[in-house]
Image: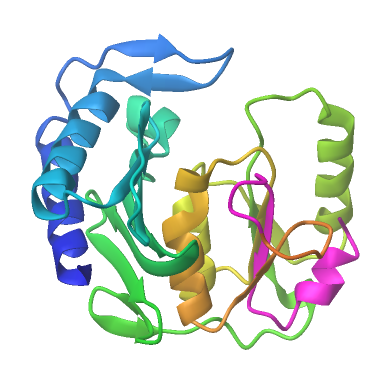
Amino acid sequence: MLEFAVRLAKKAGDFLNAHLRDEVKVEHKGRIDLVTNMDRKVQSVIVDEIERAFGDHNIVAEEGVDKKSSSLYTWIIDPIDGTTNFIHHIPVFCVSIAVMKAGMPFIGVCYNPLSGELFHAQEGRGAYRNGKRVFVSPTECLIDSLVATGFPYKQDNLAAIVSRFSRVLGKARGIRRFGSAELDLCYVASGAFDAFWEEGLKPWDMAAGVTILKEAGGLVTSIDGGAFDLYRGDILASNARVHEELLGCM
């Protein structure tokens, strides 16, 4: 199943790369929440292949797929995590494929076709970047940490979002906003970032990255420190060492 997911992510990513300069048709799902014809084309490729290979499995995909069955396995798909970056030709986006087993993270694959970075993990087997095992950073303090974040499409609580950002900015070495939650989680897993937080996310924005991060030794909770819930929509993820200090800024 892992090998299949890796091959499928590469196939989908290579399709995106080949059609990067094609005409992209953009639609609005919300005021600033965008979807393109490429999102739908790539999702169709991924879902069709999963259905052929694992026809009895559940599938949840960003652009309107919610196939339910009695299987223990659920595939969670984001055809382009970082659609806005893709539209603007910013090379920070990925194909994201995750598998949950009985509701728990089991397999995660994230592939950025422009950088060639492929992150993957399976429960109990470690996390890898381009075939080399990765681990979270050894950073102990927030002042020595580079932290990533993102901003929700719904900005009803903008004052609280900015206030939280300001508190972290005053405590950390720096903050980055790349525009792909899945890649942010992968960069925490590989030690480039020390932590990441965001609100307003969907399961397909986090499922693969959470699996990869956990296998790299990271810690994931909600932003209030409670147990992480893939369907709640918020996340605080770190190398575990700076988690409590960052939690104090939330």
Residue 43 % position (x, y)? 24, 35
Q: Which colour style is shown?
A: rainbow
| As drawn, 61 above or below 58 | above
Task: Indicate the quadrant containing the C terminus: top left, top right, bottom left or bottom right.
Answer: bottom right
| Vertical arrangement, residue 31 with respect to residue 184, above or below | above
Looking at the image, residue 232 lies above or below residue 125: above
At x 70% / y 72%, what residue is drawn? Answer: 145
**Direction from residue 49 to residue 238 in the image, left or right:** right
Residue 62 found in image quarter: top left
Rendered image quadrant of residue 155: top right
Q: Is residue 147 left or right of residue 187?
A: right
Labels in figure, total: 0
Specify the farthest residue to the front.
Answer: 70
Is residue 200 located in the magenta-colored stretch of the structure?
Answer: no
Q: Residue at x 9, y 36 (%)?
A: 18
| In the image: residue 228, left or right of residue 28 | right
Res 131 quadrant in image: bottom left
Taking the magenta stretch, the answer to whether it contains residue 237 is yes
Identify the image quadrant of the N terminus: bottom left
Question: What is the x, y in percent for residue 158?
Answer: 82, 28
The residue under the point 81% across, 67% down is: 246
Q: Is residue 54 visible?
A: yes
Which portion, as a residue range, is magenta? 229-250
- Residue 192 visible (yes or no): no
The picture places residue 78, in percent across and down from the top left corner, at: 36, 42
Give x and y (percent) for residue 63.
Answer: 36, 27
Residue at 32% in and 44% down: 59
Say if 226 sits above or below 121 in the image: above
Which is more toward the observer, 178 or 39?
39
